[in-house]
Amino acid sequence: MDHSFWEKMKFYRAARAEFARFVIHEEPELLKKFIIVDNNAELQKWYKFYVSATKDIGSKPIINSFSSVLQISSGLGITGRYDRSGKWLRESGLTLVYSFGFNGEVAVILYPFKSDGDNWKPKEENILLAVVPSNANKLRKRVTKDLSSMVAYGHVTSINGNPTLRQKIHIKWLRFFCAQNIDQKWQGSKKDDLILKGLSAAGSGSFAGIFKYGWPIFLAYILVKCG
């Protein structure tokens, strides 16, 4: 008998049950927590936000089905500005996603605001904040921080955004420390690239190379710890 298979199934079912607990608790609370995030009033003036939980229906009735995704996202909003053709410029897309995967882990992903056409959009399609074990209590503890990242990302990527200095720095940290989807391809964090270059420099015995690639990592680490 293959015990490893049944152990994996047991782990997956436990992880799935934990994510279900997280969704049941946070789905009615997520919007309430989002509304009170600092510097959020401006975004709420221009956009409405919605919480949804995507169901994996399968062969079961939807009332008994499992929600594999919990997200809060913006609706389509008029920016109050015009595009090059003289039409009202609209934007949407700001979204925070908790997605349960087949491996029993949860991906936490941020999507930016995008405007009609190519008037304005960041180079990344999204930012992978984390991939974490499916533990209801630990997921709930990180929600407030994730919502703060969402608001900061909204201000930085919206035409109507008015980010604080702290929010600008925070998004620079995320773009440095987190993997991103750029041109439909996942790219590792800039931190990882610098670490590899630093290790290469260390292997060659180059102090100048170590300093060149090591100080941005050290500085970013200090900023994150102190920010």
Image: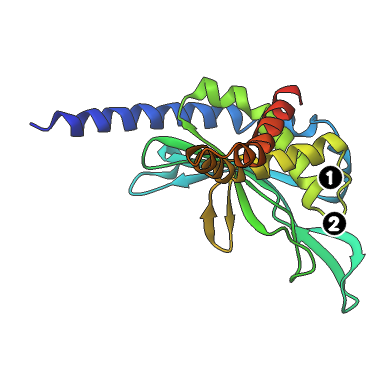
Q: Nearer the viewer, residue 35 or 181?
A: 181
* Mark 1 neighbour density, 10 Å: few (under 14) some (14–19) many (20 or more): some
* Mark 2 neighbour density, 10 Å: few (under 14) some (14–19) many (20 or more): many
- Residue 113, which numbered label? none
Residue displayed at 42% across by 42% down: 101
Residue displayed at 40% across by 28% down: 17
Would you say residue 91 is visible in this rendering? yes
Specify whether 111 is left or right of 198. right
Q: Nearer the viewer, residue 111 or 174?
A: 174
> Residue 144 location in percent, x, y?
69, 27
Q: Amino acid at mark 2?
A: Ile
Residue displayed at 70% across by 28% down: 224
> Residue 29 location in percent, x, y?
66, 29
> Residue 48 location in percent, x, y?
78, 47
Depth check, mark 2 against mark 1: the one in front is 2
Q: Is residue 57 above or below residue 18?
A: below
Quadrant of image for the C terminus: top right
Task: Name the residue that disc number 2 marks.
Answer: 159
Specify whether 177 is left or right of 39. left
Q: Which tag, 2 or 1, sits closer to the chain's start?
A: 1
Would you say residue 31 is visible in this rendering? no
Q: Quadrant of residue 194?
A: top right
Task: Name the residue that disc number 1 marks.
Answer: 43
Q: Amino acid at mark 1?
A: Leu
